[in-house]
Amino acid sequence: MIDFLAVFVFSFAVIDPIGTVPVFIAATRGFDEKEKRATALKAVMVSGLVLLFFIIAGELILDAINIPLAAFQIAGGIVLFLFALSMIFGDSKPESEIKSIKNTTETAIFPLAMPSIASPGAMLAAVLLTENASNNLLEQAQTSGIIVLVLAIVLVLLLLATKVHKIIGDAGASIISRVMGLILTAVAISNIIEGIKISFNL
């Protein structure tokens, strides 16, 4: 049985639903309500498919190229750590991704589905959270269900984006994103330590 709360917090931190709201508002500026709903739904569906791919095939790809999961844990931990530091000390998620918006062509794919929702950190987390060696099929299904739950939260927040943004504002989204970054740093260090332990049989 997985630790549902820990997996939920980790998934929520890497996907950062609240940080996606300002990105969505900026990317869909000028859209009518029907277009906004369609964009939100498409973005969540595409990001869900991307994360599902990494859950199913991520470890298989590693095995195919003979990369041990411990090495991926260390590398993934380092990437997550750098990703988290950029959330804390650099532009926050909404600020950096709003800057990447150049036009409204395929807004649902870029920057919403990737990299806002299915971020590099979320892809790494999908692989690490469903590790075959330490999680049976039921536990992997439970983890996948939690990721789907977080994506459902993303969809609800995007559909209510204007109201949510009025409550928290850009500053609130930035603060929350930085707090999520702080949580991610701890998770990243934990993954690095665990990978080192496995590699050196500590």
Image (cartoon, helix red, strand yellow):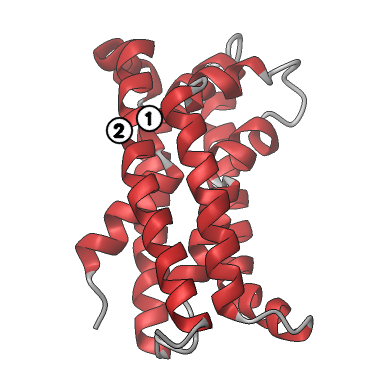
Residue 192 in the image: x percent, y percent?
46, 63
User: Residue at the spot x=53%, y=35% of the render?
Assistant: 40
User: Is label 2 in a helix, a strand or a loop?
Assistant: helix
- Picture layout, residue 98 above or below residue 87: above
Quarter of the figure with residue 139:
bottom left
**Quadrant (top left/top right/bottom left/bottom right) for the N terminus:** bottom left
Mark 2 lies on residue:
179
User: Is label 1 in a helix, a strand or a loop?
Assistant: helix
Residue 64 in the image: x percent, y percent?
77, 85
Residue 48 appears anywhere in the view: no
Amino acid type for the residue under numbered disc 2: Val
- Picture layout, residue 166 above or below residue 173: above
Badge 2: residue crowd in 10 Å (few <14, some 14–19, many ≥20): some
Q: Is residue 27 left or right of residue 130?
A: right
Badge 1: residue crowd in 10 Å (few <14, some 14–19, many ≥20): many
User: Residue at the spot x=63%, y=58% of the render?
Assistant: 50
Q: Nearer the viewer, residue 201 or 86?
A: 201
Q: Nearer the viewer, residue 2 or 145?
A: 2
Residue 108 disc label = none
How many numbered marks does the figure carry?
2
Residue 177 disc label = 1
Instruction: Give the CA separation, mark 1 to mark 2.
Output: 5 Å
User: Residue at the spot x=38%, y=12% of the render?
Assistant: 170
**Quadrant (top left/top right/bottom left/bottom right) for the C terminus:** bottom left
- Picture layout, residue 129 above or below residue 37: below
Residue 14 in the image: x percent, y percent?
43, 47
Amino acid type for the residue under numbered disc 1: Ser
Q: Nearer the viewer, residue 81 or 34?
A: 81
Residue 86 appears anywhere in the view: yes
Is disc 1 in contact with disc 2, using a CB cutoff of under 8 Å? Answer: yes
Residue 5 in the image: x percent, y percent?
20, 61
